[in-house]
């Protein structure tokens, strides 16, 4: 068999490897946002982060929370039910919901539960106790203690200052609020994210 | 400077990160059993997990690969490395970047990009190192004394070119202020997938294409398969990033494209594997698996085949429901980087290092023991992650159990993962001992053997 020309020509080899690669590279990185504008802009109002929430986001990043918690309700019944709230199913995450996220935390692994719709599900005082010691949340949340004590694998974040926990909690409470989905007893949508 | 100084230095430095990297993996596995172990800020799970992946991927695999390439390339081209001094400078800067990034990540300074946690300025420094490496590679190829380029050289050139774009996209472009949300996520998984597929795969395959025929003393099985493998992988690999977001908040058509191209990946992989195994089969039966080198290369080939068959199946939408977001993924990632490419690098170092320093490998027997410990431990390690992952996937699918109850069920799987992971660390320690004795201990001078 006659050998192809690139085998003795470095320029042909290099250009060939680059061009063949660049077809897929361009079509999967540059083209998708041009076709689907929700990659970078939203047709609906999206929450703008406050300074405190942004700081919380940085703390979330600095401690690698994303390696155990995803932030995406996939288009699957099990995700919607499991990460729903009081028998209300969580809405599937949409790409436009993330447009204001300077840093994304979609994640690949769920050692802990998904957090895409965690905002408003727990009181901020619950988060406080949970960050301080996930396996022993004190008097107030005694009923949850036993379950968490045995199974939770979350690190203690005792080393975060009170201010840092406050910011981190503020950030968590924003998650999922771009869609109203939790309903109160009389059927009205709840907007109690700051509690 | 003496020939191969840069190669030797890069290989020795990479071994340091190998042991640190796997030890950190050991600690993370421990934390899944006893979450309160090592309860200090810098040893928080999220941080050591990131240092673990960064050190084993860049400190160990990338650096070892660069070292091996600096040895292999001049051998194939019948000349000397373009510049030993540049090579040594690359090594020094690369180690500053790797050590610095590890310290920064421990301190909580990391990017939100998986495998790209390495913060500014160290990611920029890594790019500088890569350019220096590229100059050395291109310079050596241009100054060659042979006419035709062997298949390893194609893959090395491919690695140099693809890595540049993949690394810059993942580490620098994702951090631009207007790249947010899903756009950033898409680029992240472009990087995450191609870091394995277009950095470590061509690097590992280039090494194997040299070491396998050389250590078996048998010519390569097929030139045609080499051609198919190389050109198909350079076209299809890059399309598959979005298969990390199947069922996720990204365009459905992009997921479908990624799934289709994940399947087409079987073509280059089977071409490469057939080529490797064909070379083994063409060798006399009693000479196929003599000593640790052919063993490691053979097992690396098998792990490469398995990991690349897993990929397409995981990408099927219905299969993905069960295998995604749990321990299965961890098993898959480890089979690629620990199973396939670490085995190739270990085999490569066993071949290359004694030839650089002119001494025999201290103990082939120890190498064989290391091979069996690492092979059996890694099969157990990958296997238990897959079984645990599938169990977890099915229980998540069944909406009766709570998340915590299902997590609690994972205890036995995490225990076996910890035990088999510890055995892998033992294997690595034996490897390092063997290498240290070869370098500085009782190993004999290499005589009468073709260097």
Image (tube, rainbow, N blue to C red):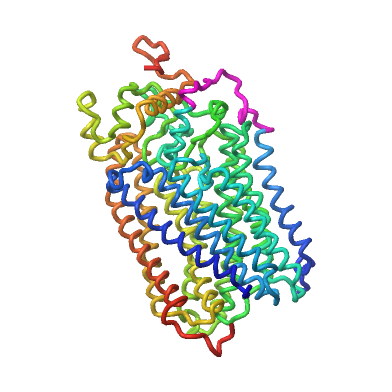
Relative vertical location of residue B274 with respect to residue A74 in this rendering, above or below: below
For the point 47% across and 71% down, the residue is: B296
Relative vertical location of residue A193 with respect to residue B171 in this rendering, above or below: above
Residue A135: % across, % down? 25, 36
Q: Is residue A135 visible?
A: yes
Q: Give the quadrant of residue B220.
A: bottom right
> Residue A3 vs residue B131: left or right?
right
Residue A46: % across, % down? 54, 20
Q: Is residue B413 magenta?
A: no
**Count of numbered circles on the image:** 0
Residue A32: % across, % down? 65, 36
Nearest the camera: A85 or A133? A133
Q: Give the quadrant of residue B152.
A: bottom right
For the point 34% across and 35% down, the residue is: A159
Outermost top residue: A186
Residue B3: % across, % down? 63, 75
For the point 34% across and 41% down, the residue is: B395
For the point 35% across and 59% down, the residue is: B421
Relative vertical location of residue A60 with respect to residue B241 in this rendering, above or below: above
> Residue B105 vs residue A186: left or right?
right
Relative vertical location of residue A29 with respect to residue B234 in this rendering, above or below: above
Q: Quadrant of the C terminus of chain A?
A: top left
Outermost bottom residue: B448
Q: Is residue B393 visible?
A: no
Outermost front residue: B1
Q: Is residue A37 magenta?
A: yes
> Residue A22 vs residue B429: left or right?
right
Question: Magenta region: which residues?
Answer: A34-54
């Amino acid at each position: 068999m006659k050998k192809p020309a690139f085998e003795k020509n470095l320029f042909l080899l290099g250009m060939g490897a680059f061009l063949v690669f660049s077809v897929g590279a361009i079509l999967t990185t540059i083209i998708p946002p041009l076709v689907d504008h929700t990659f970078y802009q939203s047709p609906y109002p999206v929450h703008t982060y406050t300074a405190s929430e942004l700081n919380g986001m940085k703390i979330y990043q600095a401690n690698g929370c994303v390696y155990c918690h995803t932030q995406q309700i996939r288009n699957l019944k099990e995700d919607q039910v499991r990460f729903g709230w009081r028998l209300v199913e969580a809405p599937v995450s949409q790409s436009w919901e993330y447009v204001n996220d300077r840093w994304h935390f979609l994640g690949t692994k769920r050692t802990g539960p998904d957090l895409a719709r965690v905002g408003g599900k727990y009181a901020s005082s619950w988060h406080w106790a949970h960050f301080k010691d996930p396996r022993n949340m004190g008097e107030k949340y005694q009923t949850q203690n036993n379950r968490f004590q045995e199974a939770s694998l979350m690190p203690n974040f005792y080393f975060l200052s009170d201010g840092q926990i406050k910011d981190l909690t503020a950030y968590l409470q924003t998650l999922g609020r771009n869609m109203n989905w939790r309903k109160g007893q009389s059927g009205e949508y709840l907007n109690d994210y700051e509690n | 400077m003496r020939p191969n100084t840069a190669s030797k230095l890069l290989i020795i430095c990479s071994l340091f990160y190998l042991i640190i990297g796997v030890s950190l993996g050991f600690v993370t596995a421990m934390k899944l059993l006893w979450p309160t172990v090592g309860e200090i800020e810098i040893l928080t799970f999220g941080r050591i997990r990131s240092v673990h992946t960064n050190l084993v991927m860049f400190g160990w695999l990338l650096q070892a690969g660069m070292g091996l390439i600096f040895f292999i390339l001049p051998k194939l081209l019948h000349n000397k490395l373009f510049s030993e001094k540049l090579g040594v400078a690359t090594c020094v800067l690369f180690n500053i970047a790797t050590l610095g990034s590890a310290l920064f990540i421990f301190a909580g300074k990391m990017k939100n990009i998986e495998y790209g946690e390495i913060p500014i300025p160290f990611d920029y420094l890594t790019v500088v190192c890569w350019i220096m490496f590229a100059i050395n590679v291109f310079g050596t190829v241009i100054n060659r004394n042979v006419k035709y380029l062997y298949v390893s050289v194609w893959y090395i050139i491919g690695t140099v070119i693809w890595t540049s774009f993949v690394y810059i996209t993942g580490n620098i472009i994702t951090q631009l202020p207007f790249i947010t949300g899903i756009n950033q996520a898409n680029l992240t998984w472009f990087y995450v997938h191609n870091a394995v597929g277009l950095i470590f795969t061509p690097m590992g395959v280039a090494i194997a294409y040299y070491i396998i025929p050389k250590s078996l003393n048998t010519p390569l099985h097929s030139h045609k398969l080499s051609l198919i493998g190389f050109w198909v992988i350079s076209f299809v690999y890059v399309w598959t990033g979005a298969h990390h977001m199947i069922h996720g908040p990204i365009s459905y058509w992009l997921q479908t494209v990624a799934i289709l191209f994940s399947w087409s990946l079987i073509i280059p992989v089977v071409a490469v594997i057939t080529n490797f195994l064909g070379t083994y089969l063409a060798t006399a039966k009693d000479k196929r698996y003599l000593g640790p080198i052919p063993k490691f290369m053979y097992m690396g080939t098998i792990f490469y085949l398995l990991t690349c068959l897993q990929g397409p199946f995981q990408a099927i939408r219905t299969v993905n429901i069960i295998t995604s977001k749990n321990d299965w993924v961890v098993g898959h990632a480890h089979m690629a980087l620990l199973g396939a490419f670490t085995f190739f690098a270990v085999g490569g170092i066993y071949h290359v290092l004694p030839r650089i320093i002119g001494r025999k490998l201290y103990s082939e027997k120890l190498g064989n023991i290391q091979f069996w410990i690492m092979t059996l431990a890694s099969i157990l390690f990958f296997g238990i992650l897959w079984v645990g992952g599938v169990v977890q996937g099915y229980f998540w699918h069944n909406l009766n159990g709570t998340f915590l109850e299902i997590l609690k069920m994972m205890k036995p799987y995490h225990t076996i993962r910890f035990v088999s992971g510890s055995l892998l660390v033992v294997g690595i320690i034996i490897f390092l001992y063997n290498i240290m004795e070869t370098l500085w201990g009782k190993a004999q001078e290499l005589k009468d053997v073709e260097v």
